Amino acid sequence: MVNDPRTLHQRLVEQPRCTGLALAPDGTRLILSVQALDDEGVRYVPELWEVDPAGERDPRRVPGSRQGDFAPAFAADGTLLFLSDRETGEADEGPGPSLWSLPDSGEAAWTAHHPGGTTAFTAAARSDTLACTAALLPGAADARAHAGLLGRRRRAGVNAVLYEVTVDSGAELGPAEPHTFVLGRDASPVDAGGQGLEGAGDMALAPDGSLVAYTRAPTGAAPDTNTVVIADATTGAQRVTLSRPGHLYYSPVFTADGTRLICERQQEETYDSEWQVTLVAIDPLSGEETDLLPDFDNWPWPGRAICSPVPGDTTLWFTGDEQGHRPVFRREPDGTVTRLTASGAYSSLCVTPDGSTLYALRSTLDSAPQAVRLDAAKADQDPTPLRTPGALGPLPGTLTEVHTTGDDGFALRGWLVLPEGAAAEHPAPLLVLAHGGPQGSWSDWPWLWNPWPFAARGYAVLLPDPALSSGYGQRMQERGRGEYGGRPYDDVLALTDAALARADLDPTRTALAGWSYGGYLANRTATRTDRFRALVSHAGLWNLESFQGATDMHAYFRKIFGDPRIHRERYDADSPHLDATRLNTPMLIVHGGADSRVPEAQSRELQHDLRRQHVPAGFLYFPDESHGIEAPNHLGLLYETVLNFLDHHVLGEQWRRPELL
C-alpha cells in the first residue's frame, strides 16, 4: 500500500531522483539527469533521460546513453556532451571519466580524456570551444607528464599527500591540483591555470569561446576569499584576477555578448557581520565590479543565474529562498526584479533561444522534483508540469503552515506535516525537525530527513525556520548573528509551542531531531529542556572548542566563534558540552566515520557524556559515510532506526532493532 508505514521510507530510498536539466541550443531537446538505484540497491548511479519540452510525450532514456553517463550539456551545434567512465578503447588513457559526444542519432563517441579523469566541463554557446577541469600533479607541466607521475605513484603503491597550504574541504584532496583546460578544434589543450586544491570546476566560457572564466579556491594566506580569473582561451594568459577580502565568488556565467561576467558574491559570516549574497557583473577588460541587486533583501542563492541568450539583452533569471519557497526571479535591464512563481522551490534553470520560456526543476515539501515549463516574464505564475520519471505518488497526509512571533516581535513561520487521521479526538504525536545550515530553509523536497516516512507512522512533523534561516530578509541574519545556540533555539521552541496549540497535536508525545546545524540544535535542546521524550542528533556539534580546531572549515568557524583563548565567553554561551550534567532525555546519535565537516569525535564525546549521566542512548554509526548519508541501503537503515527509536520512546512501543543492525 502507498501509505504503509512499514514501506514508505524504503520506497522513498528506491525512488529515482531528478537532479538537473540541459536544454539544446535550438530549444527542442531537454535532457534530465537522474540518479537511480543500481541492480544491487547499494548505490545511486547517474542516467540521462529526455523530457518532451511540450509536455506531450512520456520521458525516455536518451538513445545511445548508458547507466553511468552524467553532467549533460550541449555543444553549440546541438551535439549532446556528457562525462562517463565508459571504456575508451585507448590502453594508455587510464581510469577516470572522459568527455563523450552523442549526436541525435548514432553511437556515443569518445571526445577527450585527461589522465585521472575530467571532473567538469562547459561548452561555448556559439563556438566549438570547450573548457574542462582536470588535475595536474605537482611538477607536471602538462597531461603527459601528469600521466607519467600517476603511473609512478601507482606502481610504487604511494597515495600519500604533502599539504603545504591550508586545506578546508570535506573531500579527500591532493596531491593533484584541478586546472582549467580549454579545448579548441584541432588544437592541444590550453592550460588556463590552477583552481587550487579545492577547485570545484566552477567555469564559464564566453559565447564566442574567446575567454574562459573560473574561480580559484582560497589559500592559506587568504582563507576568507577566492579569486575570479578571466583568461584568454587561446593562450591561457590571465587577463583579469579579482578578489575581495571576506567574500567568495561562485557560479560565473557570461552575458550573451560576452561583455560582462555574472557571478554570485557571498560575504562570509563572522561574529560581527552577517552572511550576504548578491549578484555582481564584472567587466572582463577592466575587472570593474557592479552590484546587480543592491536593494534585493533576500539572496540569489542557491543556484546559478542564467542570462538572456539574446545579444545586447541584459535580462537575467535567478532563484532564491523566500518565506519557505524558492521562487524564480527575473531581473530587467533597468534593475527591476519580478517574482515569476507563486509557490515551490526551483533549480536548474534553462532558457529558450528567444528568451521567452524557461525550463526548471520544481519541488515542494510534498512533491519530489519534476521538470516544468514557465513563461519567462509572467509574475506569480503556476508552471506547466512536464512528464518526468520518479513520481512518488500520494503522500500520507497534508502540508500546512505554522506562524508565531519571536521574543523580539519578528514574524516566524514553518511548515507542518499533518498525518492522516490527526484530529482533536486522536491527536498526533509531534516530531520537530531542525534543518542544517544554519543558513538554509525548509523549501524544497529533501531526500535526507524527509518528513513523510514519519507522517506514514502517524507523526506530525514541524519544519521550523528559525533565526539565521534564509528567505526572510537580512534582518533574519542580524537577529541570529553570534547566537548559534541562542535565538535560533528560542525560535524553534516558539514555533513548537505555536504548533502544539492545535487540538490535533499531542503536547505530551513530542520529539526533536536535526542534522548538521539541526543536530547542534538537538544537542543544545538536550541541555536546556526535558520537554521532549526523545532527541535525535545527526552529525551535530557538541564541543565547539574541539570542533572548530578539527573541522575542515576551520578558518570559517574560527571567524564565527573566535579563538577560545581570547573569546572564551562565546564558547561558554553556546557550547552544549559545558552543560552535559543536564542531559536526561533519551537520544539517538547518528554519524558518518568519514565526516570532515563535523568530525565523528563530536558524537563520540556526546555519547560518553550521555553514558556518564546514565541517559538511554544509541549511536548509529556509518564508517564509510561523510557528512550526509549517501548510500541508499544506509539511508533506509537511518529511517528505520530513527522511526523505531521514536516509536519506543515517544509512543511507548517495544524497541525493534533493525534486522541488518
Image (cartoon, rainbow, N blue to C red):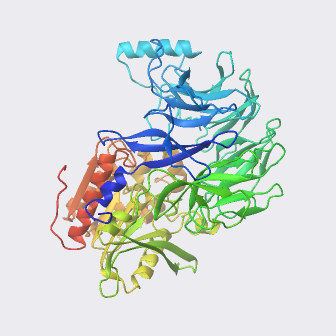
Q: In the rendered picture of this protein, how many numbered marks are placed on residues?
A: 0
Q: Which image quadrant: the N terminus?
A: bottom left
Instruction: Note whether 488 is above or below 208 in the view shown.
Output: below
Which of 137 and 313 lies nearest the eye of the viewer?
A: 313
Q: Position of residue 136 (x, y in %)?
A: 54, 21
Res 5 quadrant in image = bottom left
Q: Which of 531 and 527 is in front in this view?
A: 531
Question: Residue visible at 33% across and 82% down?
Answer: 507
* Residue 445 or residue 491, whichever sits in front: 445
Q: Which percent across, then down, holds residue 203?
A: 64, 36
Residue positioned 38% across, 59% down in the render? 449
For residue 423, which quarter of the picture? bottom left
Task: Provide residue 239's location: percent of width, then percent of height.
Answer: 77, 29
Residue 374 shown left or right of residue 337 in the figure: left
One can see residue 347 in this view: yes
Q: Is residue 358 above or below residue 479?
A: above
Residue 606 in view here: no
